[in-house]
Image (cartoon, rainbow, N blue to C red):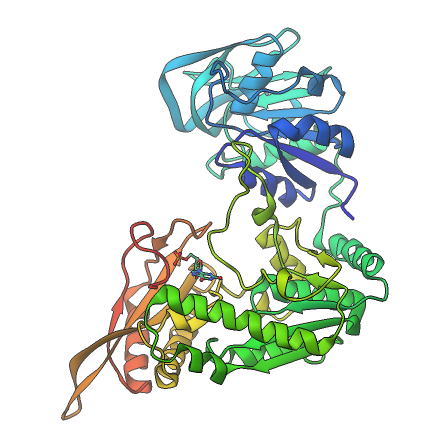
Amino acid sequence: MESKELVIVVDFGGQYNQLIARRVRENHVYCEVYPYDKALAKIKELQPIGIIFTGGPNSVYEEKAPRIEKEIFELGIPVLGLCYGMQIMAHTLGGSVKSADHREFGKTPTIVDTNSVLFKGLSKEEIVWMSHVDYVASVPEGFTVIAHTDNCPVAAMQNVDRKLYAMQYHPEVLHTEHGKEMLHNFLYGVCGCTGSWTMANYAKTAIASIRKTVGTGKVVLALSGGVDSSVAAALISKAIGSQLTCIFVDHGLMRKNEGDEVEAAFKDSGMNFIRVDAADRFLGKLAGVSEPEKKRKIIGEEFIRVFEEEGRKIGSVDFLAQGTIYPDVIESGAGDAAVIKSHHNVGGLPAVVDFKGLIEPLRNLFKDEVRELGAELGLANYLVWRQPFPGPGLAIRVMGEITKEKLDILRDADAIFRQEIANAGLDRSINQYFAVLTSTQTVGVMGDFRTYDYTLALRGVTTTDFMTADWARIPYDVLDTISSRIVNEVDHINRIVYDITSKPPATIEWE
Ligand code: XMP
């Protein structure tokens, strides 16, 4: 279903591998990432119009360093090597790589040859992001040096006849000021890409492909209301309408109005939409439980049970659909392990419903592409831009034992927090923010009365991968508005604190 203009990113285990792929896609060129040891086979099979080698942590002279077959350079397909990718290109083709005494690291002024197609339209001196110890000391035969820094004799090299190019620095990180242009020059000026990768095109081909796969069959999808499952639902329902049934298990642990919002978005969209109101069931199972992992387990199990019951009512199902996205799929070149998303989505349900096949129409998309596709499909903004929300929902944001009363207090406070963050225009720059109802009660004074009520914690983080995060610097006056509104408008909260720990050592959620 993909565009014919495929670029293959060959993964040597560097930290920016996914970023390179995203940058290529931002240039409207489709690409896929494969580990270095599977690259040659994939290149032969898929016939890309360009190849990019990523960086990696190794040194080409280490015994176990990733290698690449010389044959790749003989296929006539343009190759761009980045960092380790440049060193392995030089090493494989007969150049020499040496180790410097000091690491060259950070933003570095670099003299570039503007006659090279890579630097077309740029200045003679460019700022690039360097991070290396090894360097190419002499280029292979047929290559010329097209950039250097004070410390690095070969910051970029090319062999125009063989369409081989390489950069020692990282054009994919934003610190390389014109990195985007350099990649653009490679993709368009060397590989001859035309930029056919757009979400509008993707939607068209994906819809056609889903129709072809499904035929007259029935598809079931577990809809959580999160971005991925919502966009998958919208896409599949565009393709096959009422052959799709979405089961939305409302566990009563969603944020304020969220269940109704999901229902409103999908009820009249042409699919069969089933909302299962299972709040009492979940609360019943959770009664008296305060240990976080136990809560998670109960919710996961109950979720599957509800889904199973609903699935049985539908009868025979041909396909199960899931909102798996590309970062979950990409294998790391450094080993065999897939990049694991450490958190357990409610999507993993294959075992509980009998089905013939799996449909994962977002499997090749990055998160930002999923959002763009959602917008393209006409999905409401509040769904497209929804921040991550844990499968167990507010159960892990009410500390300790969960009651309906506590959930309602938290929902009201959290709604005010979110509203004020949006009013302050911070809703896209803070990547995740929410309120936590602690189990701590403290003394307060309200009018002439003493109170003994809950402490609410506010959490806001900035992060790109959710594996590490910094606490968001919300301006004091915004915090002040949030604090006064919550204590005035929500009963049983008399104290509010803001969480100023990063991850690590803390996690994003409190439980
Ligand atoms: P932590 O708290 O581990 O969270 O720093 C990282 C990201 O994962 C989300 N999260 C979960 N998502 N099921 C999920 O689907 C879970 O049990 C779960 N726990 C945490 C969290 O909201 C954050 O975005």
Which residue of the protein is positioned furthest toward the bottom in this rendering?
448
Position of residue 414 measured from the top left corner of the image (x, y, whole percent): 39, 75
Which of these two is toward me, 316 or 511? 316
**Can the viewer see residue 23?**
yes
Q: Nearer the viewer, residue 85 or 317?
A: 317
Lateral position of residue 502 relative to residue 216, left or right: left
The residue drawn where x is 50% and y is 51% is: 341
Q: In terms of image quadrants, where is residue 446?
A: bottom left
Q: Residue at x 73, y 76 (%)?
A: 314
- How many marks the image carries: the answer is 0
In the rendered image, the quadrant that contains the C terminus is bottom left
Tell me where residue 49 appears, x and y as whole percent.
75, 31
What is the x, y in percent for residue 24? 63, 39
Q: Position of residue 58 (x, y in %)?
A: 47, 23
- 453 in relation to 2, above or below: below
Q: Is 412 situated left or right of 21 in this image?
A: left
Q: Quadrant of residue 179?
A: top right
The quadrant of the rendered image in which ligand 1 is seen is bottom left
Instruction: Please give the name of the residue rendered at 63% of the width and 53% of the height, measured from the top-left corner.
Output: 369
Q: Would you say residue 156 is visible in this rendering? A: no
In the image, residue 223 above or below residue 162:
below
Residue at the (60%, 61%) spot, across then down: 228
Residue 379 vertical placement versus 41 (above, below): below
